[in-house]
Amino acid sequence: MGKTISELILSAKSGSDVRAGDIVVAQVDLAFVQDTTGPLTVRQFRAAKFKKPAETLKAALFLDHAAPSQSREMSNDHILLREFAAQTGAFLSEVGDGVCHQIVAESFAKPGDLIVGTDSHTVTAGGLGAFACGMGSSDVAIALGLGRTWFRVPETFLIELKGKFSKGVNAKDLILYLIGKIGADGATYKALEFGGSGVANVTMPQRLTVSNMAVEAGAKVGIFPADEVTMRFLTEQGRADHYMPVQADDDAVYEKTITIKLGELEPMVAKPHTVDNVVPVKEVAGTKVQQVSIGTCTNGRLEDLKIAAKILKGQYRNLKTRLIIAPASRDILMAATEAGYIETFLEAGGVILPPGCGSCLGLHQGVLGDGESCFSTANRNFKGRMGSPEAFVYLGSPATAAATAIKGEITDPREFL
Amino acid sequence: MLKGKAFKFGDDISTDHIIPGKYAYLRSNLPELAKHVMEDADPLFASRVKPGDFIVGGNNFGLGSSREHAPLVIKMAGVKAILAKSVARIFFRNAINLGLPILICNTDDIANGDQLEIELEAGIIRNKTNGKVLTFGKIPDVMLKILDEGGLLPYIEKHGDIKL
């Protein structure tokens, strides 16, 4: 009986033959924290009397959620993390480098890796064929210190993709469609594994978008096979030697299989206040929004900015709608500048934020006021998520966001293509 | 035996309801942070909850962020257990790691303000207000071992490693 990708990775990392439902202790390749959960991790690490991270793993700290810091308190937390990095030799990603998940994808995650991070969107690295999942500060503190932690081997849903996206439809529409179909707890404790002949048509930035939101269906990981697309991406990043093919066994056992024909998808929107409140864009078209946010770890990659820039080229935002762009990393901001996308956004009346999490978590840089609505390419629309609990957040693709910014109301992007 | 009052909430209580991201700057000042516990679900919760009380949710309690501060501020409020029909994965681990029990049961039989008595060992919840007796699902062994030590840090302090 064959194994799923999750079973294969957890078998390799635990040195045993494991199946869904088993509890294992497995070796962690990368453990990381960000600036809102890292300080507690450091305190727990010290309380557990660890001195340095285990030598068997890579340890990394990211200053991205408050980047640059918006308050004295966050600045003090940054000092704590910088000092910890200096003391222990852990990698430090400074303010402006980018969102942890993007940097992990660009520079660290390898196919077959086991990754834990104190951020729920750690699942993003599943796009590269890594078993990557979010955990709390205590769990990651212990993983950092011991170099290993415990996992329950998840059952797997196979998401079988067929065909290719049609014009104006993208990875965000795919993952929103899936979450709408199975629900915000539809995959709790499970692995989502993407497969099928259509996977080859899904680019690495698109895979990262899909994996990023696996947690919004409750999943532990959202994992893609590592294939030629992965190899090309790693080669572009100067990490061709990090490539290793990762495929599930042909006779792997899945709890269920969901088949999605990419060509039949249409632009989707998640309405307030849950990510599974998903409808085709036509059902909410015309809804007025005061802010459009493009970027973050979900949709802040070059390919996303290209899509948005193409629609916004020569256009100007609706005068009652703010347009805020947060590239996911410095490399992306530089590439987008070189490609002319940033100029396009500025000419369209947009605001460019430093690479980071921006207003996604309601901390700064685009916090919503009472009664306001925002169309965002981020991953969460919970009540209060972007500031006011009286605000409304709609989630969708960069294409839909760009079209919405122009008209000031939620708009099917295919009108502009 | 645990005794206290139920504070009932609905389905999909997210970590942003429990402790919104906008207060991330208070996470190194826990007493201040804790004042905002459950603020976006019930602004009066923090002033009304008493040590020994329980939070009762519906489906998918604690979805969202990995912020351990969510179960932490609930624990700091004196809540002795969270009861829910189902719970999100990261929140579940985080709560157990802090020594805060999560009991999976049919919370339809509990109303806001009901008086509950919980026998953790026996797996029984008595609703003293409506007389109903509920049972809750077994906590996985590895989590029970961590819970029994009072959380992950005391567990590691005692055992020096993760022992399954």
Image (cartoon, rainbow, N blue to C red):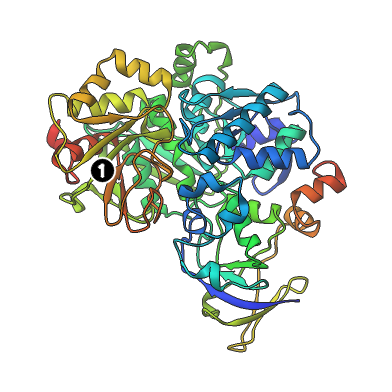
Position of residue A54 measured from the top left corner of the image (x, y, whole percent): 75, 28
- In this image, B42 relative to B160: left or right? left
Q: Secondary structure at mark 1?
A: strand
Is residue A308 or residue A278 the one in the foreground?
A: A308
Q: Crowdedness of circle 1 by 10 Å Cα count: few (<14), some, many (20+)?
A: many
Quadrant position of residue B100? bottom right
Q: Quadrant of the C terminus of chain A?
A: top left
Q: Residue at x 64, y 51 (%)?
A: B94
Position of residue A375 measured from the top left corner of the image (x, y, whole percent): 27, 44
Position of residue A87 measured from the top left corner of the image (x, y, whole percent): 72, 24
Marker count (numbered) = 1
- In this image, A205 relative to A188: left or right? left
Q: Residue at x 58, y 69 (%)?
A: B55
Kindly identify the amino acid type of the residue bearing the numbered disc 1: Gln
Instruction: In the rendered view, tell whether residue A366 sits above or below residue A340.
Output: below
Q: Residue at x 42, y 53 (%)?
A: A182
Q: Which residue is mark 1?
A: A291
The chain carrying label 1 is A
Q: Is residue A34 visible?
A: no
Q: Residue at x 62, y 52 (%)?
A: B30
Q: Is residue A299 visible?
A: yes
- In this image, A75 relative to A362: left or right? right
Quadrant position of residue A170? top left
